[in-house]
């Protein structure tokens, strides 16, 4: 899934000194929050669509907004790096793991409610669930998102989209917990949307829900467009194997997939990671890949494209953590 904290925080070195003390204090404080699930040294290959990734120092699963607020307060007070995840579809955690706290907003925050032409979805709801709600209501405007994996919170934070549209086109506002712990409503005009970008990627705040402003449409036409979009995605993209979606962003005036294919990257392999023969901008895990295989493959492809075309591709995948 596209991830809420696609800021890709810089790795923080662990030590036997201050960091270890802060981590121990955070564990103790989190343990006093009733209902909060806290997993220690949780392997991230269980929580990403790529199926790779090392251990997370603290993997925190809240069930209520109050638990989210209190967990954030602990992370801030203890000075722990923080990563917010949804469905793990746009995330690569290196094999050495992540030094800090992961706050997971998934199934526990997946409610979707229709209010006239608006849909209010909690940030952990999948785009598939939100698209289904719009389709059932005969609301148009979100068809471009049909088949995009991941959660609505991550999609909103990174302004996910296709050639047919982007989240900025339909978002009316996003409810967040800001850096001070307050729940505030950010209206569309304040979100600074750009290509795969919003201000939420540069702030230590957490999206709680997303409000979409759609339009009444012909229900049969909306459903047909959604089904056509899913079918097209199935034809073009390697959906049967684990991937993290598009590896690279679209460079100005061109397409990453075209450059990668022209540079001979389709089928390029390192270990169990391979650029899909079906789509040159997707890396898939054939079952035995490590995160370091993926990292090495990304760099090899980037060098090939640069050597061939003088273009330095920028990653769309959020890579965090440390090498082994």
Image: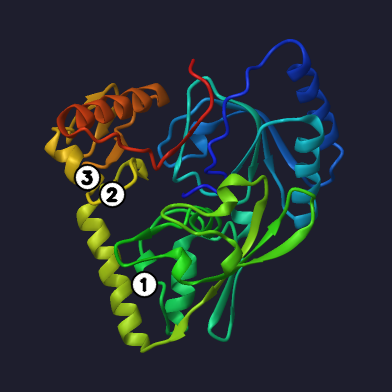
- From the viewer's perspective, is residue 215 above or below residue 166? below
In the rendered structure, the answer to whether residue 121 lies left or right of residue 49 reads right
Spatial CA span between label 3 and label 1: 23 Å
Q: Residue at x 53, y 84 (%)?
A: 117
Secondary structure beneath label 1: helix
Camera-nearest label, 2 or 1: 2
In the rendered structure, the answer to whether residue 16 lies left or right of residue 163 reads right
Residue assigned mark 2: 252
What is the number of the mark on residue 143?
A: 1
Q: Nearer the viewer, residue 96 or 174?
A: 174
Q: Position of residue 193 (x, y in %)?
A: 50, 59
**Do the residues bearing badges 3 and 2 touch, measured as CB atoms within 8 Å?**
no
Q: Is residue 279 visible?
A: no
Q: Position of residue 13 (x, y in %)?
A: 63, 17
Q: Nearer the viewer, residue 210 or 9?
A: 9
Secondary structure beneath label 2: loop
Q: Earlier in the sequence, mark 2 or mark 1?
A: 1
Residue assigned mark 3: 257
Q: Residue at x 39, y 24 (%)?
A: 290
């Amino acid at each position: 899934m596209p991830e809420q904290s696609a800021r890709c925080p810089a790795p923080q070195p662990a030590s036997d000194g201050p960091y270890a003390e802060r981590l121990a204090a955070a564990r103790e404080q989190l343990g006093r929050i009733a209902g909060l699930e806290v997993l220690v040294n949780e392997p991230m290959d269980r929580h990403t669509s790529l199926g790779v990734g090392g251990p997370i120092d603290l993997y925190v699963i809240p069930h209520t907004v109050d638990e989210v607020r209190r967990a954030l307060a602990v992370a801030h007070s203890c000075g722990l790096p923080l990563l917010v995840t949804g469905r793990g579809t746009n995330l690569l955690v290196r094999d050495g793991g992540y030094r800090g706290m992961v706050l997971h907003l998934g199934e526990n925050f997946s409610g979707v409610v229709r209010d006239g032409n608006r849909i209010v979805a909690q940030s952990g709801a999948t785009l598939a669930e939100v698209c289904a709600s719009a389709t059932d209501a005969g609301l148009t405007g979100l068809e471009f998102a049909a088949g995009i994996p991941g959660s609505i919170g991550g999609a909103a934070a990174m302004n996910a989209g296709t050639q047919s549209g982007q989240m900025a086109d339909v978002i009316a506002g996003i409810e967040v917990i800001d850096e001070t712990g307050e729940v505030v409503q950010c209206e569309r005009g304040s979100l600074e949307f750009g290509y795969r970008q919003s201000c939420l990627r540069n702030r230590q705040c957490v999206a709680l829900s997303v409000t979409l402003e759609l339009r009444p449409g012909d229900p049969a036409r909306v459903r047909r467009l959604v089904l056509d979009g899913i079918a097209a995605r199935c034809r073009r993209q390697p959906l049967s194997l684990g991937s993290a979606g598009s590896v690279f962003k679209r460079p100005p005036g061109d397409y990453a997939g075209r450059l990668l294919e022209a540079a001979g990257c389709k089928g390029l392999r390192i270990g169990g990671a391979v650029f899909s023969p079906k789509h040159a901008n997707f890396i898939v895990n054939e079952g035995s890949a490590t995160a370091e295989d993926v990292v090495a493959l990304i760099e090899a492809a980037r060098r090939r494209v640069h050597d061939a075309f003088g273009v330095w591709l920028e990653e769309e995948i959020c890579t965090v953590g440390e090498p082994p």
